[in-house]
Image (spheres, rainbow, N blue to C red):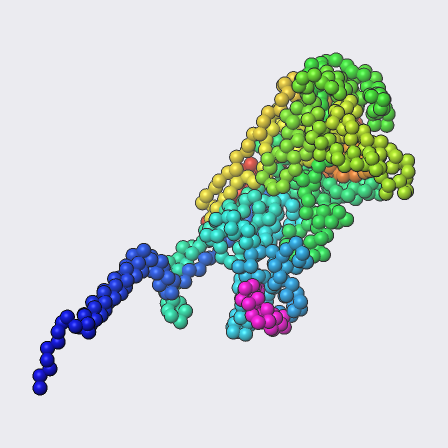
Amino acid sequence: MRRPPVDPSLPGRKLGTAGLVLAQVLVITLFALLGVRMWYLQVPMGEHYRELAVSNHHQRLVVPATRGQILDARGRPLVTNRTELVVSADYHELVGMDDGGEAVLSDLSEVLGVPLTDLQQRMRLCGPDVQRPCWPGSPYQPVTLAEDVEAPIALHIMERSDEFPGITAQAHAIREYPGGELAGQVLGYLQPVTQEELEAREELRTQFTGIDHVGRDGLEKVYDSELRGTAGLRTLGVNNHGEVMEVISDRQPEAGMHLVTHLDLEVQRIAEAALARGMAAARPRYKADSGAAVVLDVRTGGVVAMASVPTYDPSVWQGGIDQETFDEMLSEEAGEPLLSRALQGQYPPGSTFKVSSLSAAAESGYSLRSTYACPGSINVGGQNFANYAGQGHGSITMHRAIVVSCNTVFYNFGYQMWLSDGGLHPEGEPDEAMANMARGYGFGAPTGIDLPYETSGRIPDRAWKRTFWEANRETNCRRAEHGYPDVAETNPSHAAYLKRLAHEHCVEGFEWRAGEAVNFAIGQGDVLVSPLQLANAYAAIANGGTRYEPRVGKAFVSADGSVVEEIEPVVADRLPVSDETLSYLQAALTEVPKAGTASGAFGDFPQDQVSIAGKTGSADVVGRQVSSWFASYAPADDPQFAIVVLVSQGGTGGATAAPIAREIYEGIYGFSREEAEAEEGEEREDAEGEDGEEDDEVRSEPALPGGRPWSGLPAVRPDGSIDMLDR
């Protein structure tokens, strides 16, 4: 039986047609979305997924470069590398374990023979409230747990990696300091890269190996990029099991450049030993708590030696440092050995500063041919200012004032120039001739040496005094009102004096007074310089007026010797003095070790062979013993070296610092005390018609043959060995 035809106008028929159309639209839409998604994945995101696919089959390994050595001027090693086995931990993997990695560290402690607590302490990240030892580097690099591990132990850990998850044992290049403490502050040290450094330095991010260290101080810090070299990159093809199938590409690391310095290892050794001996000799009477000695090449500004006592061995930083040692290196009781007194210490220079004051007087119109009164003392503003031991010398020239170190001549210069500027209340802009000349000598500003954290010293003047007053006025006014009750309990009279002084500073502390001007003229009061600044100033006097920026670095040489990049001397300025003034000053300084305040230290020194020019200084600071200075250069007729010695709280310059400088000169030129005595004997024997003893029989080996800094550069052979310079 046939079904009757359906009327297309009926509702059911209409609904079926609409559903079919809707299904077709839905299918078309889904295909369109799928097409758009496929286009998105293949075109805009194609490169991204290609890299992901490659990464599933490739593994990139950053290969660290060998860090360059640091050499002395002759080619002798100051900092080298050695390889040792190091056990490290993945910080995040261990911390992410349920027990914080305690079980793994416990097993590791038994293998290493190291207490568990020591390993746990090393795993901590350093911070303000974390006691050392702790991890000073980034938490994203392996945390060093043990250094110099024996090979069987390292092999045991590597073979049982499943028992020590997150633990690795591998060979690391470690810095080695053959001289121990020698030049410790100059050389610097390395520490692990911190997260902040990774974020701040692009070259570290792009070459980060996970075991990188960076320079934290000294030459290691300043020349970190050159010493570091360029890391290599090895791309390996791996299968889905992580097995290496092939080496796809291999860019070898480029070793860091060797840094050749102006330092001479033997002169550095002599300077440190002489400084230590001189300080020990001064201690029965003085504290002699610290000291510095600087030897500069006056022709280039090269640093031949830079000693600071106390010092330290930079290797103490390797593998982490315990809190006790860290605190000791920062403590005043231990002498703060991290601090380089040579470029970071600031002290009143005493009479060594008179070279600047004489220059200021001469350039301001005071005649070099006139004589000036040198009484035992003068009175300025109701205050008495005296010579050393109150000794007067009558009417003398400026030349003689330098030789005998007459303070009162320079006091008068300072006072008269203060008056010519308008005294307490100058009208208009004062000349400030003394202060401006000091700045012309390089005082009051960093020298620009290639070492970090150099201090600027201080050259006070009227502007500085007002700034200082504004910064301290509130404290002084409070003390003027409330006094010093803590001092009054034990010393009422001193407390009363301090209260009057605080009132004076509160009300009139901005005034540049006559007493400050006269003290300035002899390097006392608020004048502060570093030994390096003083050495640089005397080097400029010696070479005819050119002030260089001191440089420790001399050149970079590639590890195979194929590339040499010299570090050229940099002229900072010229001394603002005439040739006549400079020649006059040189003549006066030449006489000081022969007939002046340094003659006691150099009385039997063979000055007929090497003439010394210099100036002693004895600087007073309230509450401290007198500090000893000697600033010099030699030979006076053909200057090569400038040497400055400081002993903090070490006594007078002629008694302590000058003998130390003499010992350094003796080491450089190969003289000895026995030679001087032998020469005296020769003179007596010659007078009797007998042959004297030959100098060579008593002369010691000179540290610098020929009496000159090393010229040229040591050669690095293609095999990496170093051909040292020889005269």
From the top left corner, tell me how far across and down residue 641 is, in percent.
64, 33
Q: Residue furthest left?
A: 2
- Quadrant position of the N terminus in the picture: bottom left
The residue positioned 63% from the left and 55% from the top of the image is 127
The residue positioned 62% from the left and 24% from the top of the image is 575
The residue positioned 58% from the left and 29% from the top of the image is 572
Image position of 173 with respect to 369: above or below: below
- Quadrant position of residue 500: top right
From the top left corner, tell me how far across and down residue 702 is, in percent.
66, 39
Give left or right: position of 682 versus 21: right
Asked if one can make out residue 556 in the rendered structure from this viewpoint, the answer is yes
In the depicted view, which residue is nearer to us: 277 or 190? 190
100 magenta-colored: yes
Q: Which residues are magenta?
A: 86-110
The residue positioned 79% from the left and 39% from the top of the image is 649
In the depicted view, which residue is nearer to us: 518 or 35? 35
322 magenta-colored: no
Image position of 141 with respect to 552: above or below: below
In the depicted view, which residue is nearer to us: 266 or 464? 464
- Quadrant position of residue 283: top right
From the top left corner, tell me how far across and down residue 102 is, in percent.
61, 70
Give left or right: position of 309 versus 394: left
